[in-house]
Amino acid sequence: MFFFVDLRIIYCFMKNIFSAFLIMFIFSCSKKQPYLEYQKKAINLRNNITVFNNRNETISFDFGMWMFNERKLEVDAIANWIGIKQKGKSILEPINIIWVDYKANTKNEARENITTFLNANDFLIRNGSSVGYYGLFENNNWIPQYKETWSDKEDPKTINNHGRIFPAHKITSNLNNPVFVSTGAFSIEDELHYLVSFNEALKKMKETKEWKVFRNRFKAANIIQEHNYTTFDHEGIIVFVLN
């Protein structure tokens, strides 16, 4: 009799232990799933692109896909529209224009060539926007923004197309010639400095006599609509080449 009662007690005890373990295991898996999903969709910080000119001269290089507010290769260092959110999400500011200069011989010449491009598209230098940003090239080549803000309007308290540029990173082509690569982050903002569009900002970037479009929208991995981040209407990077 006692032996039979003891077995039932042991059986109930083991059953309760197993049930508790099963519940803990299921709960543990459900807690890990969002983290695993986040890992799968982690935000990339660099991308590679290959660009060639009309003489089959080629370069391939890594570039930072974002405008950074610190010299750190971390998501938290990406410029986030000074904290203003879009539908509850932090706005990550993407690089959306690349200039590849096969013509310049020096960094100063490369800067001048981009200045000429921007002036031809009716952009001028103005103040009134935040400064202190960086572009990234290769592993650890940080380039500070050149001068202040480039804009199609002198008054920042208007709807305006504006951006920062990061010139001129020197690399070597397959023909052993110097090539200068620059990036920029442009957007349209309203009178109160709220984001209007990343994509529409690029429509004012027209070809000039010397600068030609290499890729109209290079699909880098900086189009984000995940978790607490957004790049809003950003659709890709326009790439210009100076032959």
Image (tube, grey):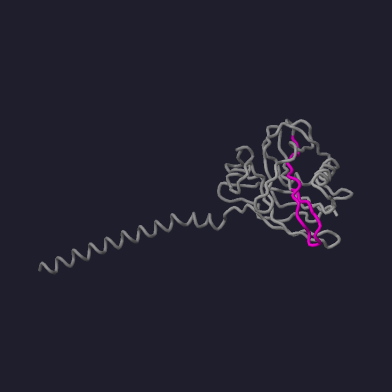
Question: Number of labelled discs?
Answer: 0
- Classify the position of the N terminus by image quarter: bottom left
Residue sitting at the far left: 1
- Classify the position of the C terminus by image quarter: bottom right
Residue 141 or residue 230, whichever sits in front:
141
Query: Bounds of the magenta span?
Result: 159-182
Q: Residue at x 67, y 46 (%)?
A: 142
Residue 188 or residue 135, whichever sits in front:
135
The prevailing secondary structure element of the residues shown in magenta is strand
Q: Position of residue 172 (x, y in %)?
A: 77, 57
Q: Position of residue 91 (x, y in %)?
A: 62, 43
**On the picture, is 69 further left or further right than 207?**
left
**On the picture, is 1 further left or further right than 118?**
left
**On the picture, is 133 further left or further right than 155?**
left
Residue 189 or residue 104, whichever sits in front:
104
Is 180 part of what is drawn in magenta? Answer: yes
Q: Residue at x 76, y 30 (%)?
A: 155
Q: Position of residue 178 (x, y in %)?
A: 80, 54
When asked about the image quadrant of residue 19, the answer is bottom left
Q: Position of residue 220 (x, y in %)?
A: 68, 55
Is 221 above or below relative to 122? below
Is 139 part of what is drawn in magenta? Answer: no
Q: Residue at x 70, y 34 (%)?
A: 129
